[in-house]
Image (cartoon, grey):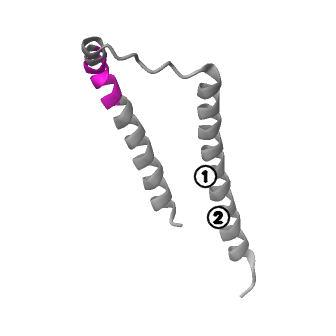
Amino acid sequence: MNKHFEDARYYIKRAGEHAKKGVTEELEPVEERFRELTGSEQEPEPSRLDNVREELEAIEDRAEGETKDALAKARRRIRGQRPN
């Protein structure tokens, strides 16, 4: 895949994550007020294990992308060194 498309996909994913965080943060007071009025309980905070698991998944995704980039770069180098 073209490096530009890989970069674009990465930045679109990050933009989506940041947008989600922004919307969540903006709607937090509304959600709290709604829960107060309806008497609903808020979902429990994610446990430390859940947070670590999410971080590990993010690291895994990043490592996978970097590995694919390194393989593509190595393949280009090999193709460039072969006699035609």
Residue 40, how many percent across, how many down? 35, 17
Q: Secondary structure at mark 2?
A: helix
Work out which quarter of the rendered image holds the C terminus and state it. Answer: bottom right
Residue 64, how many percent across, how many down? 65, 51
**Camera-side mark, 2 or 1:** 1
Q: What residue would you read off at disc 1?
A: 65
The image quadrant of residue 43 is top left
Residue 65 lies in the magenta-colored region: no
The chief SS type of the magenta part is helix
- Asked whether 75 or 44 is in front, the reply is 44
Q: What residue would you read off at disc 2?
A: 72
Q: Secondary structure at mark 1?
A: helix
The mark found on residue 50 in the picture is none
Crowd tier of the residue under label 2, counting other residues whose Cα lies within 10 Å: few below 14, some 14–19, many 20 or above? some
Report the side of 5 relative to 72 (left or right): left
- Asked whether 45 or 67 is in front, the reply is 45
Crowd tier of the residue under label 1, counting other residues whose Cα lies within 10 Å: few below 14, some 14–19, many 20 or above? some
Q: Residue furthest front?
A: 39
Amino acid marked by disc 1: Gly
Amino acid marked by disc 2: Ala
Q: Is residue 79 above or below residue 7?
A: below
Residue 28 lies in the magenta-colored region: yes
Tell me where the magenta segment starts and ends, as one range: 22-32
Residue 5, how many percent across, how many down? 46, 61
Q: Residue furthest bottom?
A: 84
Report the side of 44 relative to 27 (left or right): right
Residue at 59 percent across and 33 percent down: it is 54
Residue at 73 percent across and 75 percent down: it is 81
Residue at 34 percent across and 28 percent down: it is 24
